[in-house]
Amino acid sequence: MEETKPAVLLTSPPLEDFTESFYSYNNLKRVMSWCLRFVFNCRLATGARNHKAKLSLEELQTTETILLKLSQRRSFNTDYDSLLTSSKVPNRSCIIHLRPYLNKDGLICVGGRLEKSTLTVRQKHPIVLHHKDYLAKLICRQLHEDNLHVGPTALLALVALNIIL
């Protein structure tokens, strides 16, 4: 007689519904990190699972990359697919003037001529997010709160260091 293994089927609402239930970007990132740890642990043998009480910096950075990538796929799906296949976006794209490219993490970044500057890579080539995307709003809110509720001009300067809306 053949042995059968039980199967589990999980269904979830679309990611937009999931992310929009959070008010804080840090909370979203932490909850998503715990969910990803659970998924990765389910794929490992019992002895190799991660049972640490705290999330690692690497787990949080991986989660941030996944969230940003999902946001970009939601907002710039055709551009993302074009960059994957041909390294160019269509001429009718709304981000063509940014000379976008995919970085090593698979995120759409701004191209440019700042290679010899002393800025960090993320400042030279900011990540592109749509200004109406909920994740972009969460990031702006988090920067606003982390920097003691700075005014709009200072907040815009802080956002411009890392992302392009």
Image: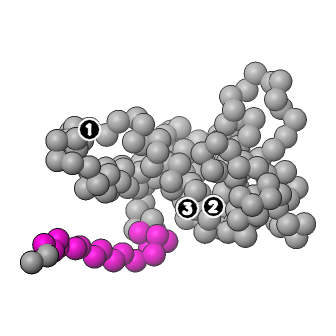
Q: Residues within 10 Å of mark 3 (few under 14, many from 20)?
A: some
Query: Is 130 one of the magenta-colored residues?
Result: no
Q: Residue at x 71, y 49 (%)?
A: 102
Task: Compare residues 22 and 146 and report the one nearer the observer.
Answer: 22
Report the residue at 64% width, 51% height from top.
Answer: 107
Q: Quadrant of residue 83?
A: bottom right
Mark 2 neighbour density, 10 Å: few (under 14) some (14–19) many (20 or more): many
Whichever of callouts 1 and 3 sits on the residue coming sooner in the sequence is 1
Q: Which residues are magenta?
A: 3-18
In the rendered structure, are the residues bearing label 3 and label 2 in contact, judged by CB atoms less than 8 Å apart? yes
Q: Earlier in the sequence, mark 2 or mark 1?
A: 1
Q: Which residue is mark 2?
A: 72
- Identified by mark 2, the residue type is Gln
Residue at the spot of label 1: 54
Determine whether the residue tagged by mark 3 lies in a helix, strand or loop: helix
Q: Which residue bears the numbered disc 3?
A: 70
- Residue at position x 69%, y 32% in the image: 121
The span from disc 1 to disc 3 (Cα, nearest Å) is 25 Å
State the CA–CA distance, disc 3 to disc 2. 5 Å
Among the 4 quarters of the image, the one containing residue 76: bottom right
Q: Is residue 115 left or right of residue 128?
A: right
Counting labels gives: 3
Q: Amino acid at mark 1?
A: Lys
Q: Amino acid at mark 3?
A: Leu
Residue 11 can be seen, yes or no: yes
* Mark 2 vs mark 1, CA separation in Å: 28 Å
Residue at 41 percent of width and 51 percent of height: 29
Task: Locate the C terminus and report the quarter of the image it occupies.
Answer: bottom right
Q: Magenta part mainly helix, strand or loop?
A: loop
Q: Is residue 32 above or below residue 90?
A: above
Residues packed near mark 1 inside 10 Å, few (<14), some (14 to 19) or many (20 plus) = few
